Image (cartoon, rainbow, N blue to C red):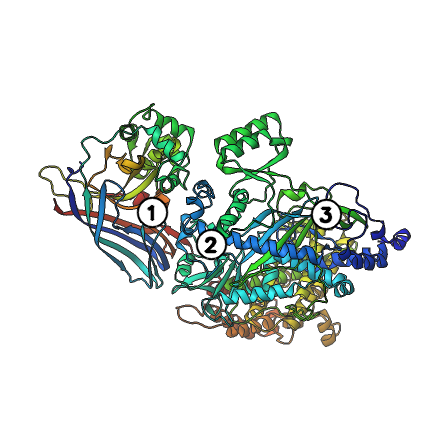
Amino acid sequence: MESNPTLSRDAPFSQYRWGGKGFDEYRRQDGQVRDAWKPIAGFLDSLGAQGIQARAEEADRLVHQSAANFHIDRKDAPARPWKLSTIPLVISPAESQVLESGLGQRVRVLEAVLADLLGPQRLIKERVLPAELLSANPTYARTYHELPATSPRRLHLTATDLSRNHDGTWWVTGDRTRAPSGLGFALENRIIITRALPQLIRQSNVHRLARFFVSLQEHLASIAPRQRDNPRVAILSPGPRSYRYFEDAYLARYLGYTLVQGRDLAVRRGRLNVKTLGGLLPLEVLWRKISDQKCDPLELEPDSTEGATGLLQTIRSGAVAVANDIGSTLAQMPALLPFLPAAARFLFSEELALPSVATYWCGGQKERTYVLQHLDDLVIRPAFVITGAAPTVPASLSLAGREELVAAINANPHQYVAQSRPSRSVTPVWYDQQLQPWHVALRSFQLQTAASVEVLPGGLARVSPESEPLDQSPTSGRLGLDCWVIGEHPVDTETTLLPPAGETIRLTRGGDELPSRVAENLFWFGRYFERAESIARLLRTTMTRLAGENELVDMPDVPRLIAALAAVGQLDPDYAIKEFEKALPTLETVLPESVFDAAQQRGLLASLTNMMNNASAVRDRISLDGYRILTRIDDELQDAETFASRDMTATIDRVNRLIPAMLAFAGLASESMTRTHAWRFLELGRRIERAWQTAELLAATLVDVIADEQQLLESVLRTRDSLMTYRVRYLHQLQPAAVIDLLITDNTNPRSIIFQLQRIDELIVELPGDATEAGLDQDEKLAKDLLHQVQMPDPFALSRVGEQRTRGELKRLLEFLIARLPQLSDAISARYLIHTAGVQALTGRLHSHGFPKK
Amino acid sequence: MIAAVSNTVRYKIKHQTRYRYSEPVAICQNQLRMMPRTMSHMLARIESHQVDVLITPEPDIVEQHEDYFGNLVYTFAIESLHRELSVTIDSDVSIHCDPYPKSEPSVRWEDVVRGVSDASDDRWLEVQEYCFDSPRIRRSQRFADYALASFTANRDMIEATLDLTRRINHDFKYDTTATDVSTTTEKAFDLKAGVCQDFAHVQIAGLRSIGLPARYISGYLHTVPGPGQQRLVGADESHAWVSVYMGPHLGWIDVDPTNACRCGTSHIPICLGRDYNEVSPMRGVVLGGGKPQLQVSVDVEVLSES
């Protein structure tokens, strides 16, 4: 964007004013800037609007780079719920002390309430809490009573949603005690803002977040049933379809934990294990990000695939620690909010320091009457579950909708709560190149250890020009902000878990510890990557040929290249190839169109999409630099869907940008990935696909001999990136035998088939060997057989033209390769990758009702 | 077909479950709720003398615990390849049943509802959770209307309950092909057919829909062969019925909608819960197995009567 001369002279903060209702985070009522803000505003004003804008753009770029926009499902599942705005929410030392002690108390109370509900239930016996909070609660599985507390606590990491009242007091709008999301985003926000405003954050005494994460690591290690000095800790994620997956991967990488999904886990010999290529490795601690009911299909929700069968039994026997404890979802039900002050008095004789937003549980007769009389001032939510759905706003309902709501509440009063809208403070937000007063919602995070409650000095702030959208759900709001808690004194700057700046190439954590699922994703990532590159090269050669000549008679090679494109799946196979000779103009449309055709399942666009899907499933295994390159390729792809100009020249340009990006990733993989099993599976996928692509290309072009082969031989060499090598060796004499040698039997050419097969043979030998079952070395046999078949023939014999102008020996070899390479891929899958056979349920009941049938 | 009521009957029960798999099973993880326990929560009392669990192949992991409802849960895992699984539970139990009092105190059903809903009933806390929805049973006006035909104004609690029990037995067809283990209570109600599980679910749904606490009991029923017939081994059934709360004086009383009767010493309760999901006798997950073939037999033998 061109710099705006009026922008550059502005001092935006000195001009920023908020005249509306609600608490002003920036200025006191007397118009003075709050102390904590003064140095920050001063620094930012000294940058001027242009300077702030530059930092904002830098932050945007960093967000993008850190793959925050690295889409999983492209349109449906953006990796981040919000964009990040540069200027933080600022919390003064005095306020942070109030928050810290209030939040600490709240966690203690919630822990005690939970322990009571899953234990003696004194709160219910003494009528402090209505019994229906449990008995009418569909999320209350009685199984939770059968699990011991992870000594001595059930709640480990919790979150609290806050809003600031007009008088400046903080109010709690909701608790998250199950598996709160957002900690990863809070961390990512801080890391990015630290890079965008390094000097400011250094000089502002901003409390670092790293200490909290060190405590988190120490705490999770301390709850391990064994190996407390170095326990194996895994984050159990719901998987790439969830909005949580990005931050799960982010946290796993930051904390050095293994990221797993349900199918990576197996309970054996009474222990919880992660399935890896090297076998089962026992886990000591599981930080679960899935719902309580999904943790174990044997004892909880039978259809769940997100948890591990038998997990509850390993918890009962004390073999694994799960955080937060299964059952902790009960402490976050909205229906608990109105009863929490009484519970705090009953349990601790304390008054709650932080009030909760006014909440009425409709299960109580008086409350229900009040709610039905004041519907217009309230919003209605489910009493027992927290959903991402917006609350019902009675004031905005039609008469019929309102009657329906009243009927629903009267029919099932226990299932509803009504809440007042919280009042929300206003903070300066940099948006649209200027400061704007926006409403703010803050999520704080707490860690409960055996000794105390630690509060993250910071949090996840969401902002929106209007207050209401922030009430919708914990992910609603227009932008995200970092939150700075200012210290009285210079803060500790030593603690950090971050790798030094510029570290990027750690791609895996270990060899045999590679989860089989990750190996599978990397293998397929490699195959799709190579497929995309091969097709892109073939398309480029073909389109460049078409763009350079006017008459098809001058391009005898083109029909063969088209046949090759059909063989590899870029063009419809039953495309009438002969017709092209008469229909040159169609070709000029068909080829560019095919680049953007997602319907061709083996085509370029589908291959890139599959490649990205596999990459996003193994996010935590791919370096930041790797991300950057993939994001670039992804951008080409995203863009492709709306790409207007589909003429051939523009399409050639596009493919020209794609190929170097892919080479950059290949280079990174080759130079920066340690030679672990992760790398081997990626390599295996690429080598198998490259050999197969080459075999298909040669079968389509050189088996049936055309009259003038010169141009075709050149195009084939160009497509396989071997033209230069050929020219250096043979100058301009294009001889079939020499071309066939270079592309098939020359083991010095990294593009030749034999080169791929030699690499495959070496790679398979290096994979973990565990020959306990018959037929396990099928992959090794196939690899050796393939290599042998390609080592044998003489290039001159292969190039010999026989009857019907066909190269018979070449044909036999290529057909063999084309048939066997997919078998090799299957054999590798069967041996290492397919690790979950069909699971079925037993009921012990004949036609399912228990009566023996005669 | 129901055995005559006597004070105490001692039974030997053998419950065998055998799976044969077409493909090998790599691992199987199971939970059993088939083991009797000593309990007295009603006029009948069950005393468990001995329980033996025999599983082949021998499990690698075995764990026993008591669940929220007090049921004994036996968890096991077999982690070596197997093509057959056999689970046999041999139990030795006594059922003591006090004869029904000549004149049981009459309780109006509305008073039971009121005592639970306003918590004036001493046992309110213990029984109230059986008034609400559970995984398989949702209260509704339809179920309430069906139950209210028996629960007319001011009617005696036992009388009304037995009337509902008899009506279900009359209105519903016992049909092992009509429903399966996962049939919803609403569906069984629509079909007016099913097996003991469905009958029990429907009655519980009706009772809860009008505010009465009701729970699900799994167990066995001892049947007496007709004159001159040998009692068939394996002919006795794994059974289910309903336990209804009738106020602080009467407590929980068991009724059997499948057989239109009040339960006595022929009913051997094993587990209780809010519905089938919480007491299912066997629950398991296997890896592999192909197409399994199942054989089940239950044999209930009287050891002594007094």
How many numbered callouts? 3
What residue is rendered at 27% in x and 37% in y?
Answer: B253
Question: Element type at marker 3?
Answer: loop
Q: Nearer the viewer, residue B138 or B173?
A: B138
- Circle 3 sits on which residue? A642
**Which mark's residue is nearer the viewer, 2 or 3?**
2
- Circle 1 sits on which residue? B280
Residue A667's x, y, as percent?
68, 69
**Which mark's residue is nearer the viewer, 3 or 1?**
1
Q: Is residue A46 above or below residue A228?
A: above
Number of other residues with Cα within 10 Å of mark 3, as a class: few under 14, some 14 to 19, many 20 or more:
few
Q: Horizontally, is B10 left or right of A536 in the view?
A: left
**Which mark's residue is nearer the viewer, 1 or 2?**
2
Label 2 and label 3: CA atoms lie apart by: 46 Å
* Disc with the residue nearer the chain's start (2 vs 3): 2
Question: Element type at marker 2?
Answer: loop
Q: Horizontally, is B39 left or right of A315 in the view?
A: left
Residue B139 visible in the current orientation: yes
Looking at the picture, which amino acid does disc 2 mark? Answer: Ile
What residue is rendered at 57% in x and 51% in y?
Answer: A241
Looking at the picture, which amino acid does disc 3 mark? Answer: Thr
Number of other residues with Cα within 10 Å of mark 1, as a class: few under 14, some 14 to 19, many 20 or more:
many
Whether labels 2 and 3 share one chain: yes
Looking at the picture, which amino acid does disc 1 mark? Answer: Ser
Residue A567 visible in the current orientation: no
Label 3 and label 1: CA atoms lie apart by: 55 Å
Residue A409's x, y, as percent?
52, 32
Q: Horizontally, is A152 left or right of B58 in the view?
A: right
Residue A741's x, y, as percent?
63, 73
Q: Nearer the viewer, residue A140 or A642?
A: A140
Q: Can you tell which mark lies on residue A326? A: 2
